[in-house]
Image (cartoon, helix red, strand yellow):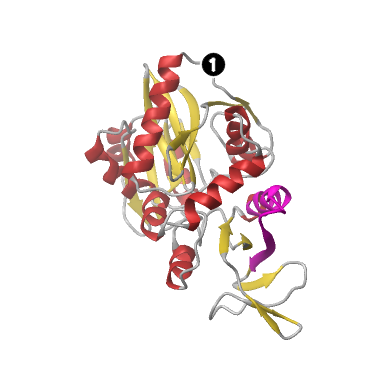
């Protein structure tokens, strides 16, 4: 199978996207696959080693007069235009299978508030929150009446904790909202939940749902920042130091979310544990896959090599 590993993109997460793609390239089984790294740079799609331009009419490159097409796309772009489903729609129109959730699921989960609104019907524990649109007038007192202090202010459609502020006073709220608007036209203000943070990866194969060992995330900062996620500024303990009952609760809730959201490929769900209840923070449909990322850690704790994890992702999505 000839695979395109797609990376880059214009989003703030470009750096981690490239690290994730490098891990995929490093551990792909050379007996099963050939591959090329394709990078999106300022809306130009190029093969990384040669700089050759990708023909977007059929997603191909031409080398020495010979057209080269791809059987599968491993999507390693964090943030837009992949985690929001835009690129998935392109590949679905071309009938080229890819490694992630489809367009609808990706778009829904990338929109934090719309995803929460959808999940309310399934009795998923969620923190109270509201959305402010750019240009909309807001009143600090009314917002804080709904969510209280402290609270989190974050872009509605963004990842890797870019633009997120923990607000501790009414006077700091406006600045946090304006900061988040630098990353998106919608901002979520969400109640602070005082608890421990956990993540659980799930991969659905043709035979079963695999819920990986749960990871406890202990940020050195006040919350799970970009630096905590990707630059070692957190302690991540896999398996998490919680009881078997709590582990099972987290894994079962993660599997339920995977099914309710019609996920494909590997997805990581992040939670806050408060009084024996796991509250969903967000669903990551293209979770980080660098050497420092949580999913590779969980797969190893599950007994899989990284190559086996990649094989399972490809096998589970190539036929769907």
- Residue 311 as seen in the image, left or right of residue 152: right
Determine if the magenta segment contains residue 200. Answer: no
Q: Residue at x 43, y 27 (%)?
A: 272
Determine whether, in the image, residue 269 is placed left or right of residue 241.
left
- Please tell me whether residue 149 is drawn above or below residue 257 in the rendered image: above
Q: Nearer the viewer, residue 151 or 125?
A: 125
Is residue 43 at all visible to an observer of this figure? yes
- Along the line of sight, the residue nearer the viewer: 186 or 303: 303
Element marked by disc 1: loop
Q: Quadrant of residue 46?
A: bottom right
Q: Residue at x 42, y 56 (%)?
A: 320
Q: Position of residue 153 (x, y in %)?
A: 43, 41
Kindly give the residue lying farthest to the top in the view shown: 243
Q: Nearer the viewer, residue 287 or 94?
A: 94
Q: Outermost residue, bottom direction? A: 65
Residue 28 falls within the magenta-colored stretch: yes
Left or right of 156? Residue 65 is right
Q: Residues within 10 Å of mark 1 (few under 14, many from 20)?
A: few
Image coords of residue 223 (percent x, y) = 53, 31
- Residue at 66%, 58% in the rendered image: 33
**Residue 129 place in picture, x, y as percent:** 32, 39
Relative to 86, residue 229 above or below: above
Residue 125 against residue 13 in the figure, above or below: above
Residue 27, image x, y percentages: 70, 47
For the N terminus, give its image quadrant: bottom right
Question: Which residue position is annotated with label 1?
Answer: 241
Q: Which residues are magenta?
A: 17-40
The single residue placed furthest to the left in the displayed view is 121
Compare residues 290 and 136 and report the one nearer the observer. 290
Mark yes or no: residue 162 visible.
Answer: no
């Amino acid at each position: 199978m000839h695979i395109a590993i797609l990376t880059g993109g214009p989003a703030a997460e470009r750096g981690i996207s490239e690290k994730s793609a490098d891990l995929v390239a490093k551990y792909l089984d050379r007996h099963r696959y050939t591959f090329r790294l394709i990078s999106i740079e300022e809306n130009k799609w190029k093969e990384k080693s040669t700089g050759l331009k990708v023909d977007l009419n059929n997603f191909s490159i031409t080398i020495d007069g010979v057209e080269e097409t791809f059987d599968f796309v491993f999507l390693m772009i964090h943030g837009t235009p992949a985690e929001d489903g835009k690129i998935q729609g392109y590949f679905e129109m071309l009938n080229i299978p890819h490694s992630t959730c489809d367009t609808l699921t990706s778009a829904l989960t990338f929109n934090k508030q719309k995803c929460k609104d959808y999940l309310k019907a399934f009795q998923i524990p969620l923190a109270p929150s509201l959305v402010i649109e750019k240009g909309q007038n807001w009143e600090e007192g009314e917002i804080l009446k709904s969510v209280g202090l402290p609270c989190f202010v974050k872009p509605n459609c963004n990842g890797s904790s870019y633009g997120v502020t923990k607000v501790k006073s009414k006077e700091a709220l406006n600045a946090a909202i304006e900061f988040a608007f630098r990353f998106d036209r919608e901002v979520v203000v969400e109640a602070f939940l005082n608890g421990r943070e956990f993540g659980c990866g799930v991969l659905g194969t043709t035979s079963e749902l695999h819920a990986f060992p749960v990871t406890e995330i202990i940020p050195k900062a006040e919350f799970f920042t970009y630096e905590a996620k990707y630059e070692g500024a957190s302690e991540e303990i896999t398996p998490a130091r919680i009881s078997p009952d709590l582990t099972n609760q987290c894994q079962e809730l993660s599997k339920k979310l995977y099914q309710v959201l019609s996920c494909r490929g590997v997805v990581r769900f992040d939670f806050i544990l408060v009084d024996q209840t796991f509250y969903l923070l967000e669903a990551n449909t293209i979770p980080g896959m660098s050497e420092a990322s949580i999913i590779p850690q969980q797969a190893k704790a599950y007994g899989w090599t990284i190559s086996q994890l990649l094989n399972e992702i490809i096998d589970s999505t190539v036929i769907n």
